[in-house]
Amino acid sequence: MKHSIMKKTKAVSPVDPPSLAERIRLEMDSFTPSEKRAAHLLLSHYPFAGLDTVAEFATRAGISAPSALRFVTRLGFSGFPDFQRHLRGELEAQLLSPLAKAGPADKSQSAPALASFAEAVIGNLRATVENIAPAEFDAVVALLSDPRRHIHFTGGRFTGALARYAESHFRIVRSQVDFIEGQPALWRDRMIEIGKKDVIVAFDIRRYQEDVTALCEAAAKQGATIVLLTDPWLSPIARVARHVLPAHIVAPSNWDSSAGLLLITEALVAAVTKHLWDTAKPRMEAVERLRNEKP
Amino acid sequence: MKHSIMKKTKAVSPVDPPSLAERIRLEMDSFTPSEKRAAHLLLSHYPFAGLDTVAEFATRAGISAPSALRFVTRLGFSGFPDFQRHLRGELEAQLLSPLAKAGPADKSQSAPALASFAEAVIGNLRATVENIAPAEFDAVVALLSDPRRHIHFTGGRFTGALARYAESHFRIVRSQVDFIEGQPALWRDRMIEIGKKDVIVAFDIRRYQEDVTALCEAAAKQGATIVLLTDPWLSPIARVARHVLPAHIVAPSNWDSSAGLLLITEALVAAVTKHLWDTAKPRMEAVERLRNEKP
DNA sequence: CTCAAGGTGTACCAAAAATTTCATATAAGA
DNA sequence: TCTTATATGAAATTTTTGGTACACCTTGAG
């Protein structure tokens, strides 16, 4: 009972944790006079008043150090440092949740390349989310969560890396996952294996690559389901795709930004992992175990 | 007299920005290696990392207590307690100004998976930008723009894809670019070629991979310059890295998000492309031409 | 008015933290 | 290559802090 409060160092429960302040308010009338003084000080400058030394805290509360000690002990802490740790923990959790904070104004001037680039990318992400129908997203999640399906990832010269990134995650979450190189010579023969049970997840943005298009068209002809991650102008693959998830890609650069594609990818990974958690968890544990037994 | 503590730290200027964090970012390149580590730790968990004891702070930063002391002294504080007082002061001012902001009423529940995931990622990007010293970023840009250097990209099982992504862009912008596979068997022999003229750009986030670390250590020993893209907890590679660019990676998922790493990567690509434009442009045109003449 | 029974503060001690010292390692300069 | 300057950490030292024992109040019941 006593120290049940402190275990919560990182529990990150969805509901706001019962702040210490709240508890103090509740128990206020059961406190001794000195304790009340301490409580009032703490509540009036919560939680900063408690971050000083005991001596400081006691003085400001108008009591003696031992009384301050007794106060925190009574709250269930094992000592003053323990009490402070808790306060800091609360503070950190509170400050981190609305981390949008983002310093105001001024820095834009000195804003180096990185900052302005980031703002553009953030704009892309927002626009990307806006333009994707939740239903479409959910449908893709359901598709990729179907254990009977075989999932193939592929992409172009730049986006191929994203396809790899996706594959390396899905490979752990579920079985029947692989990566197909874009060059026709490398997939021509595998195409015979592709059928209705297969899903192709293709990444393709402008300067659309003919070989990736060819791959998807061939697969579609065999009855495979195509999921396309592309830009707002839509890769020609869209013609044969069942699901299309477009991402905004324009950035203050000579190159396009793939951040939106990565966002969708990671969101899909997260959603599918959650969806398949019962089977994914053991798989992930098994992978961990295999990695750790280093010969 | 009693309450003097609360007000002492704030220089009640109407504009509050001279945050310590900002100053640290500015002076970053004038720091010694140990000081940089301390600075990175502090910035990545600002300001909470500094609220512990010196010993704790030093350990987490991977340096000794005296070095931590020297760091805060260098920042102009008379000692560690003084430094902590300042941090608390900033924190209090910051938390009190937009009072009652953080409405605990969160709509995250009703928001679709993609949207809430995007918000978290955007938060990560902002935090990432905040915590990278412009000077550090610029230094890396200069390094990667040096045509006499040979650039090698590498990464772990997930981040390897990002390294590939980086490589596929830089390869077009400049010469002397390649990708090194993480497994020791694949790079052992190449290591003889690595020397002072080489730059290793390593991607490594938690569940840090031993083989990537080994690669970097070996390369560093040969005199190569290491650039590290990692998370705020810093991969062990940081010990041998000349430049460290940390990205926030925590997302509402069972997996970490690499969006911050991608952001940095793309910003680097953009900056280097611009920097080398005179030589990059002809290269890019040549690549286009070669691609188009499809036999 | 006396006498418990908590409540509180003073004085002291032990523990922990901050800081200084100094030898060693590392990088810069000649 | 040899020096010199600088950076760094282990260990010793000093200072501060948290914690405790105990005596002194205060209060309320008999």
Image: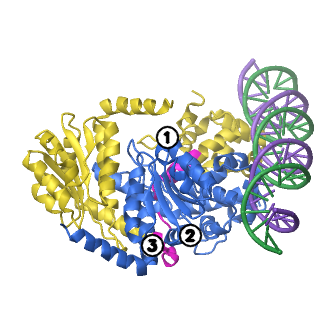
Chain colours: A yellow, B blue, C green, D purple
Marked residue chain, label 1: A
Q: Which of the pair B75/B281 is nearer the observer?
A: B281
Identify the mark nearer the N-term, 3 or 2: 2
- Residue A122: which quarter of the image? bottom left
| Residue position marked by numbered label 1 in the rendering | A18
| Residue A12 sits inside the magenta stretch | no
* Range of magenta residues: A89-114
- Is B204 placed left or right of B294 in the picture? right
Near mark 2 (Cα within 10 A), the count class, few <14, some 14-19 or many ≥20, is some
- Is A98 placed left or right of A169 in the picture? right
Residue at 33% x, 52% y is B116
Do marks 3 and 1 share a subunit?
no
| Residue position marked by numbered label 2 in the rendering | B139
Q: CA distance from mark 3 to mark 2?
A: 11 Å
Residue at 67% x, 71% y is B11
Amino acid, disc 1: Pro
Near mark 3 (Cα within 10 A), the count class, few <14, some 14-19 or many ≥20, is many
| Residue position marked by numbered label 3 in the rendering | B271
Amino acid, disc 3: Ala
- Give the number of the disc on residue B228: none
